Amino acid sequence: MDESALQLHRELYNSIQGVFDTRRPILTHLNADTTWLLQIPCPRNVVSRTGRSRFNILLDPWLRGPQSDVASWFSEQWHATESGVQTVSEVQDRLNDIDGHLIKPHKLNTKRHSPNQIDLVICSHEFTDHCHKETLLEVGRSIPVFASPKAADLIRSWNHFLVVRNIPSFSQKDSDWRNTSTEPLPHWLGVSRLVTDTDALHLHSAILITFNIDANAGGRDVTGNEAAEAIIYTPHGISANGLRHLPSAQPPLNVLALLHGLHDISISITKQLNLGAYNGLRAQRMCNAKYWVGTHDEVKRAGGIIAPFLRRKVLTVEQAIEKERVENGKIPDDSQLAAVRGVQFAELRSGESLLLA
């Protein structure tokens, strides 16, 4: 490697290492809709199965091609914005590139290429914009998949993945995040599902990803330091009541990010699909997430007989706050609504990342 190339590598190494040294999660939007890559730092004193410093989770992968539910004549959609990556192999390559740049310049000859940089896949719903067969079949067979019950049954029918798990529920009766750290997850990471009794189809549910990056290598911490951080991923939205037991969870949960869309989407006036910004504001108040990140708001190209009946209201956080202000009158400075004004809202375009500091 010549001196100019070595200097470039040094600069990239210092830049990427600086981000990784923060030991904070990184969230990357892989398309303009609701496919995400979440990179969670492993605890310092825990040796990961892969030897990497981060646990990489792929959420609701749909990268290219159409998605159709029931039949194409009924409903079919395409991305209007090209995904930041077009294949799962490209995701793996990007992660390998990061690993390569994390190798110190004087150790470049030790660079290794890993075919499986993804540690876990999560599918929140059985609908094909969340559980896209063509994209999922690009994922290696040995990578575990955690999915909602209907999505898990669908994925098992393909006979592709070696491990497919139903995501367990996180409820008021059992609000211990450690009980959701099921095999083959590491002991410091849990995946569960929040559902509400009034939502029979569980369209308006949420995925709860919990993690303790200060965990000990031996499992549960004898000192009692079992508090965890949490990321709530709810592409269609979940009612605030569905989150009401999170503040009282034991061990405590600190909600780092809420992924909830802004657009209010329904089929005509009868069926609510995406709950939108007004509900997102109420959910944010309930869980007190540090970051609110928009998701599932891409205005896709739509076809099929259902397309003319879709109704979309494009809303903003400011509009939601103003609506609440009008309804509630003057807002005291110490009210929950005043507090949400300080939330860090992010709307990431395809390919953009956010460091959850």
Image: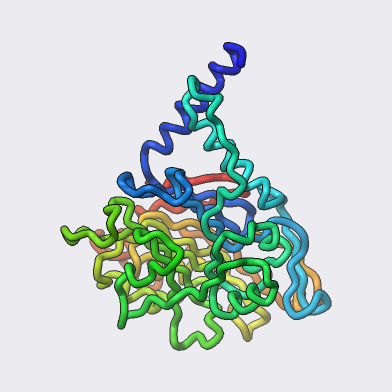
Q: Quadrant of residue 306?
A: bottom right
Please state the horizontal and vertical placement of residue 354, each as a whole percent of the image. 48, 46
Please state the horizontal and vertical placement of residue 74, each as a whole percent of the image. 79, 79
Give the side of residue 99 with respect to residue 313, left or right.
left
Q: Is residue 90 visible?
A: yes
Count of marks overlaid on the render: 0
Give the side of residue 249 with respect to residue 197, left or right.
left
Write the residue at 50% across / 71% down: 237
Residue lying at the far top in this picture: please name it: 3
Quarter of the figure that contains the N terminus = top right
Quarter of the figure that contains the C terminus = top left
Write the residue at 64% across / 73% down: 155
- 287 up-or-down from 305: above or below: above
Give the side of residue 118 with respect to residue 19, left or right.
right
Please state the horizontal and vertical placement of residue 140, each as a whole percent of the image. 64, 57
Write the residue at 56% across / 17% down: 6
Using the image as rendered, state which of residue 104 and residue 240 is in the foreground: 104
- 326 up-or-down from 272: above or below: above
Using the image as rendered, state which of residue 258 and residue 155 is in the foreground: 155
- 277 up-or-down from 17: above or below: below
- 278 up-or-down from 255: above or below: below
Please state the horizontal and vertical placement of residue 154, each as a whole percent of the image. 65, 77
